């Protein structure tokens, strides 16, 4: 009885010890924001409104495609608040209407009607709407006050009170199965008009009574030319419906009038009108867009029948109306230079015109500089206001195709720019910064071929002189700047001053966004150093970013290649660029006429130190990039040792290929997982830049358990097609990518995805949903060769006949997760942590020690010797483990880890809606002296000891001499 | 020690009886049992083909036949013929140019024989021809199945697996395969071991819990509280003078 009783105490001590050990990881208060930063984004703007409630308001309201409703400070571009709704169609914002202090929103395809308080961003009320797909909504005013909002669904119209969201009435629309109701309009009278259309037949107009929803009038108008009210009709003036006939270009103002205007071929004319206040009719002026850069301002005369053209704008990209007080103005954006394509400095000019006369207002020109690496202007939001002298001033928000927002103030000052493309980062890489001039000089000295003794000495001397010079300059600068206040010394990070720091902690983050815009971001400050917009990127494109040459090969510039692949056709293109400056490389990428199945980066380098990228097309032919003679020769030589794998998840097929000398391929293995049983959901190899420091683990009895470190190992995760909770399973296959041998095959019963997993070193960690116990579980697989290594010098997949021992353990995890990644360090000495992105936006740094299949059920002497934590079925979540404290990353999608020059430090970037960068120290900063390290004390002690030794030595000598004399 | 084989024998008989019972008992419940009966006694064979060519273009020939026995205890055996003189020479030539020796088996299901669904395609694996030659044709072929008994993969390794370039002099060494054949079914990944953990915790609690009976706070520390209260009362009556003195001092 006694020994076990004894044992229990050390066990608990043990647990306490470990909890203490990992507890000390949290950030200190004074470290907040020192090594980390966060940027918050909202996504592509769908609706934008200026707060026109008061003159001095600084607010700007946006609703975006990421289901976010946000408020910005229009002076700085900073976020006041934002509301992140559910992702996907459930949270889509159908419409955003602003009236006074209330922002009305229809959410989720007509599911909910919400009212927000624009001052604080609080929710006023929320009303659940009847089912039916949303069509339109508008404010309804009565006697000059807006009290209701009308929501038009496919088959019903409902009226809600603005104050509490209660439904006033709801009416079914007549003949809703034939008539497509598309618009709702109210001009301040006692009626609400609903417009419906039977395509190419007639238009239906129904007037409902505001009081009780009774149909007052119902009219049908023959309109065989009309297919959609939404796209070709607007209400102008006193209840006149203006429609444009795309075929004959006639403007139907009901009655019809034809105008002598010419439309660009293949262009659908668009009408733009403005209703400044819901209690009043829309203004009688409107724009007609006739071509991509041709607009006409038209006016409906008071008789309601004739239309007069006011002004012709050509070229004009974008137009917008804005109202302040009683004045309505039209803002028109025109290209500044006539020779748009030839000039380098392209800019756009925005001018203000009086809407009722078409006259240009004086001193209203604003120049909008067009970024060459950005997209074209896409939409214009104008906020006009009355100045003190009663003239109209304005501010403009320009949305460009690359989802960037630029805010411009008179006279032509860009106040701020937001790169909203960063709300959807797809993939990223971190690239080392280049060396400084002096460092590069030294590098160059060693890089060049030796040419005799004397020139080498000379070269060395000259570089030493340069170094001395630089050092003196640095000293001088220090001396000069010592008297300046501290704030001024801090210089901005620019692309010119970029250089690698001592420990390589500052890197260039190359981010690829879904919109096709590339960014280069300084990892230390988070400032965007370069951007490049790739036009003609399909929305469903798949990106793969490959670093072909790092900065280590001076004077060759670093080189990154972005593989852009169309998901449907598989056709791909390459964009080769310099990751430090973002400039497109002059190297011509190969033409890829056939769909690309697989791309692989070989460790083979060409004479310019660029790694060779192989692209496999659908005929299993291989294209090499770069494809110089040197490369082709090297490929021929080592063709028989280049293997690659292809995965067709739709057929459940995994197959392996070997390269032939003529760059064709041969299929050498095939594994087929029947799709009737399970489907492949994810395949993951190991990261090529991963280092493993120790070959094995020392066990309690001093023997070594060797790790199975197969660099070609693939982890294949499948999910069962049978979704029944009792029969559903998740399969984990470990397959050798060279031989196709199934190393291990495990089935997690009663489990369902989504499966998140990390494959690294000799382990795989995966997370799944347990359908029986209804919880998330973590499972860890570790592979060991055993106590003896088969071949300790080199690993070859072709020569490893014995299967590894596989250990596995499973734990309960008390939270769902969204993404997972493992830390990575320079030499792999530091212990590993798992970085787990939680739906709450927190990023958990979970020590791998807790996910160790050798955690013992019963503590023994050996396991204690080995520092194994006793098994506990539940994985703890400690708040100190959140590396981003309160800086949550909304909708975290991916975590990227990169090693730094310090072994203890790993750089982490979490991206999703927000971007968060920080450093983590999984084994604490064992290679860094603390900030408060007492240099003075240590050196004084050292000196004291030194002198004490000298003195005592002298004394001892004297004593010895005296003794000898005696 | 002597009792072990006997009990083993007994144990091996029991399942057989049980299986038979089960089979007889539920003959009319479904096709699975009848199927099991069928395969248990007959099994079926699939061809095992191999290919080794100097030009590395696959031309598969018959190597042997795999006797598969599905059902509850899947088993597999291989009957294969010797290599012909010509094959031996080709194999040596392929080994000399570091070619590959490939094998393939058709995709079949071990359990679902009744449907006889002929799945198209093969499962292929390879090994370097030189290692096969140097190991004197001693290879290990492993068949992998998934949860429902479909063959999903095959693998071949030789023991030893390395190519050291040693010449195989004796032709006899290359005549017959010395094959070890195994079939691997997926292992069940463990569930979280809650029951065992709770049991362990209970045991620990029992050991520790008995002497310290749960008493209420007051029951435990009544004397301390009482003592404290008395002390406070005593000190509060004495305090005014002392506190006043201190204040004066400061």
Image (spheres, coloured by chain):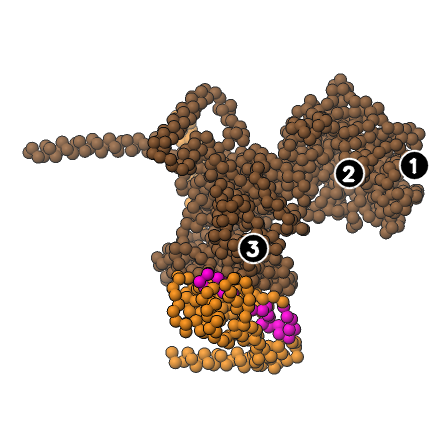
Q: Are both tags, 1 and 2, on one chain?
A: yes
The chain containing the residue under callout 1 comes to A
The residue under label 1 is A256
Is residue A215 placed above or below B66 in the rendered structure? above
Is label 2 in a helix, a strand or a loop?
loop
Q: CA distance from mark 2 to mark 3?
A: 71 Å
Colour orange belongs to chain: B
| Image depth: mark 1 or mark 2 in front | 1
* Residue located beneath label 2 in the image: A163
Magenta residues (range): B95-119
**Looking at this view, is A300 or A401 the one in front?**
A401
| Mark 3 surroundings within 10 Å by alpha-carbon count, few (fewer than 14), some (14 through 19), many (20 or more) | some
Chain containing the residue with disc 2:
A
Residue designated by label 3: A664
Kindly identify the residue that appears in the image at 65 percent across and 71 percent down: B117
Residue A240 figure quarter:
top right
Q: Position of residue A216 (x, y in %)?
A: 92, 42
Residue name at image x 81 percent, y 34 percent: A290
Residue B105 shown in magenta: yes
Q: Chain drawn brown, letter?
A: A
Q: Main structural element of the magenta stretch: helix, strand or loop? A: loop
């Amino acid at each position: 009885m006694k020994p076990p009783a004894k044992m229990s105490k050390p066990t608990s001590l043990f647990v306490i010890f470990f909890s203490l050990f990992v507890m000390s990881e949290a950030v200190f208060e004074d470290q907040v924001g020192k090594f980390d930063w966060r940027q918050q984004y909202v996504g592509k703007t769908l609706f934008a409104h200026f707060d026109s409630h008061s003159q001095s308001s600084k607010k700007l309201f946006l609703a975006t495609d990421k289901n976010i409703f946000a408020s910005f400070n229009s002076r700085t571009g900073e976020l006041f608040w934002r509301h992140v709704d559910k992702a996907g169609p459930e949270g889509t914002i159908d419409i955003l209407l602003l009236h006074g202090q209330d922002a009305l929103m229809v959410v989720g395809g007509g599911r909910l009607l919400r009212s927000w308080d624009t001052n604080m961003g609080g929710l006023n009320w929320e009303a659940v709407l009847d089912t039916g797909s949303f069509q339109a909504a508008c404010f309804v005013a009565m006697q000059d006050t807006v009290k209701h909002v009308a929501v038009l669904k496919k088959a019903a119209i409902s009226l809600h009170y603005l104050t509490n969201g209660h439904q006033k009435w709801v009416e079914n629309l007549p003949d809703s199965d034939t008539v497509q109701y598309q618009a709702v309009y109210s001009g301040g009278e006692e009626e609400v008009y609903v417009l419906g259309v039977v395509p190419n037949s007639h238009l239906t107009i129904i007037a409902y009574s505001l009081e009780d929803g009774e149909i007052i009038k119902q009219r049908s108008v023959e309109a065989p030319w009309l297919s959609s009210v939404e796209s070709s009709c607007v209400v102008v003036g006193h209840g006149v419906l203006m429609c444009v006939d795309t075929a004959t270009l006639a403007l139907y103002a009901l009655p019809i009038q034809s105008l002598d205007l010419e439309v660009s071929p293949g262009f659908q004319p668009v009408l733009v009108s403005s209703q400044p206040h819901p209690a009043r009719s829309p203004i009688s002026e409107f724009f007609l867009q006739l071509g991509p850069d041709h607009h006409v301002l038209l006016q409906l005369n008071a008789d309601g029948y004739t239309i007069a053209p006011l002004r012709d704008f050509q070229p004009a990209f974008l137009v917008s109306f804005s109202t302040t007080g009683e004045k309505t103005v039209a803002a028109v954006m025109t290209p500044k230079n006539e020779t748009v394509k030839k000039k380098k400095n392209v800019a756009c000019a925005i001018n203000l015109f009086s809407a009722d006369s078409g006259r240009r207002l004086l001193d209203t020109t604003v120049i909008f500089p067009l970024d060459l690496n950005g997209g074209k202007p896409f939409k214009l939001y104008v906020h006009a206001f009355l100045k003190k002298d009663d003239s109209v001033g304005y501010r403009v928000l320009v949305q460009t195709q690359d989802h960037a927002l630029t805010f411009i103030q008179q006279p032509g000052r860009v106040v701020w720019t937001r790169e909203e493309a960063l709300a959807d980062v797809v993939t990223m890489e971190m690239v080392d910064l280049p060396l400084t001039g002096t460092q590069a000089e030294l590098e160059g000295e060693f890089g060049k071929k030796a040419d005799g003794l004397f020139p080498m000495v000379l070269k060395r001397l000259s570089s030493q002189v340069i170094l001395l010079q630089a050092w003196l300059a640095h000293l001088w600068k220090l001396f000069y700047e010592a008297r300046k206040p501290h704030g001024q010394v801090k210089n901005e990070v620019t692309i010119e001053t970029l250089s690698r720091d001592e420990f390589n902690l500052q890197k260039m983050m190359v981010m690829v966004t879904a919109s096709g815009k590339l960014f280069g971001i300084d990892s230390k400050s988070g400032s965007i150093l370069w951007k490049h917009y790739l036009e003609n990127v399909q929305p469903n494109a798949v990106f793969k970013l490959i670093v072909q040459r790092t900065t280590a090969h001076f004077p060759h510039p670093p080189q990154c290649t972005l593989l852009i692949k169309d998901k449907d056709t598989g056709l791909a293109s390459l964009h080769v660029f310099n990751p430090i400056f973002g400039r497109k490389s002059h190297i011509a990428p190969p033409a890829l006429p056939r769909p690309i199945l697989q791309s692989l980066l070989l460790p083979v380098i060409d004479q310019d130190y660029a790694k060779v990228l192989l692209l496999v097309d659908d005929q299993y032919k291989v294209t090499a990039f770069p494809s110089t003679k040197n490369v082709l020769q090297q490929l021929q030589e080592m063709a028989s040792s280049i293997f690659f794998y292809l995965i067709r998840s739709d057929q459940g097929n995994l197959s392996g290929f070997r390269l032939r000398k003529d760059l064709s391929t041969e299929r050498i293995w095939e594994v087929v997982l029947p799709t009737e049983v399970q489907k492949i959901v994810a395949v993951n190899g190991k990261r090529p830049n991963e280092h493993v420091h120790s070959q094995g683990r020392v066990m309690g009895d001093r023997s070594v358990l060797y790790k199975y470190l197969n660099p070609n190992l693939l982890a294949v995760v499948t999910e069962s097609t049978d979704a029944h909770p009792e029969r559903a399973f998740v399969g984990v296959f470990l397959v050798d990518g060279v031989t196709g041998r199934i190393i291990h095959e495990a089935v997690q019963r009663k489990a369902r995805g989504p499966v998140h997993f990390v494959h690294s070193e000799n382990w795989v960690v995966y997370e799944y949903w347990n359908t029986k116990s209804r919880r998330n579980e973590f499972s860890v697989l570790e592979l060991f060769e055993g106590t003896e290594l088969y071949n300790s010098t080199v690993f070859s997949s072709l020569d490893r006949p014995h299967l590894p021992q596989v250990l596995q353990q499973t734990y309960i995890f008390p939270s769902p997760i969204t993404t997972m990644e493992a830390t990575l360090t320079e030499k792999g000495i530091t212990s590993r942590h798992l970085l787990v992105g939680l739906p709450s936006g927190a990023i958990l740094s979970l020590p791998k020690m807790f996910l160790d299949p050798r955690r013992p059920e019963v503590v023994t002497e050996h396991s204690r010797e080995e520092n194994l934590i006793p098994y506990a079925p539940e994985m703890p979540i400690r708040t100190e483990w959140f590396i981003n404290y309160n800086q949550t990353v909304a909708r975290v999608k991916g975590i990227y880890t990169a090693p730094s020059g310090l072994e203890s430090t790993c750089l982490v970037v979490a991206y999703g809606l927000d971007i968060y960068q920080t450093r983590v120290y999984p084994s604490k900063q064992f290679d860094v002296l603390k900030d408060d390290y007492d240099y003075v004390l240590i050196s004084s002690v050292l000196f004291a000891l030194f002198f004490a030794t000298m003195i005592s030595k002298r004394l001892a000598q004297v004593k010895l001499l005296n003794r000898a004399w005696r | 020690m002597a009792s072990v084989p006997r009990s083993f024998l007994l144990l091996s008989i029991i399942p057989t009886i049980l299986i038979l019972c089960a089979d007889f008992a539920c003959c009319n419940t479904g096709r699975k049992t009848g199927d099991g009966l069928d395969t248990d006694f007959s099994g079926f064979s699939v061809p095992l083909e191999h290919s080794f060519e100097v030009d590395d273009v696959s031309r598969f020939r018959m190597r042997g036949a795999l006797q598969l026995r599905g059902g509850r205890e899947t088993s597999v055996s291989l009957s294969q013929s010797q290599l012909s003189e010509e094959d031996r020479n080709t194999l040596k030539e392929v080994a000399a140019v570091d070619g590959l020796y490939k094998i393939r088996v058709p995709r079949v299901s071990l359990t679902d024989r009744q449907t006889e669904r002929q799945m198209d395609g093969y499962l292929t694996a390879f090994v370097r021809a030189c290692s096969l030659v140097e190991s004197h044709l001693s290879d290990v072929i492993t068949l992998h199945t998934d949860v429902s008994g479909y063959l999903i993969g095959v693998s071949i390794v030789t023991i030893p697996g390395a190519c050291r370039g040693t010449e195989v002099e004796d032709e006899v060494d290359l005549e017959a395969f010395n094959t070890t054949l195994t079939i691997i079914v997926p292992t069940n990944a463990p569930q979280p071991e809650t029951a065992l953990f709770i049991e362990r915790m209970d045991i620990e609690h029992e050991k520790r819990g008995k002497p310290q009976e749960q008493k209420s706070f007051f029951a435990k520390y009544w004397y301390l509280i009482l003592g404290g209260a008395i002390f406070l009362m005593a000190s509060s009556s004495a305090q005014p003078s002392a506190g006043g003195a201190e204040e004066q001092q400061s």
